[in-house]
Amino acid sequence: MGATMQVKMVKMFNHGVEVDRRMLFDRSTVQHRGKLVISDETDQGRHRTSKIARIVSARGTIYELRDVSLVWANEGRITLTGDERLPNEQGKVVCYKQSWLCTLDPDSPALT
């Protein structure tokens, strides 16, 4: 069983390129809402256990970070870092570094 909490999440990188820090707190920046779930899982491709963080909505997993680490936590906010796997133009999966800035979202409806 992993840790879970309702959050608003902002991605800090776009395909491995750091987002301007001012944009992280801009009202126009897209925030993804959902349940943050962190758990240990067996990575079949790498034949080892890996810590996985997911943002989950009622429709299922929206975003996922692999080999995730907690970087910082303070006053209802946390930063997680890990690997984000996305398909490129050729359809091959590419691994990018990614960090999420997560803010506790007590007003979000709980997911069951």
Image: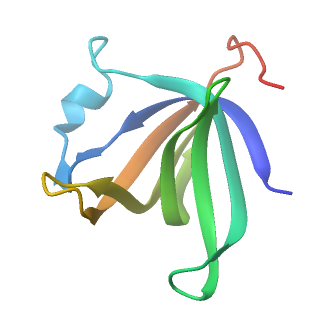
Q: Is residue 80 left or right of residue 105?
A: left
Q: Nearer the viewer, residue 56 or 71?
A: 56
Q: Is residue 34 left or right of residue 19?
A: right
- Quadrant where the N terminus sits is bottom right
Residue 55 sits in which quadrant? top right
Residue 82 sits in which quadrant? bottom left
Find residue 53 and report its horizontal and vertical position in percent: 59, 53
Q: Is residue 60 left or right of residue 39?
A: left
Q: Residue at x 54, y 65 (%)?
A: 69
Q: Is residue 17 left or right of residue 47?
A: left
The residue most toward the bottom is 47
Q: Residue at x 34, y 21 (%)?
A: 30
Q: Nearer the viewer, residue 40 or 59?
A: 59
Relative to 103, does residue 47 appear above or below in the rendering?
below
Residue 26 sits in which quadrant? top left
Find residue 105 and report its horizontal and vertical position in percent: 64, 21
Can see residue 76?
no
Can see residue 67?
yes
Find residue 89 and report its horizontal and vertical position in percent: 13, 51
Q: Residue at x 47, y 25 (%)?
A: 32
The residue most toward the front is 90
Relative to 69, does residue 91 appear above or below in the rendering?
above
Q: How many marks?
A: 0
- Quadrant where the C terminus sits is top right
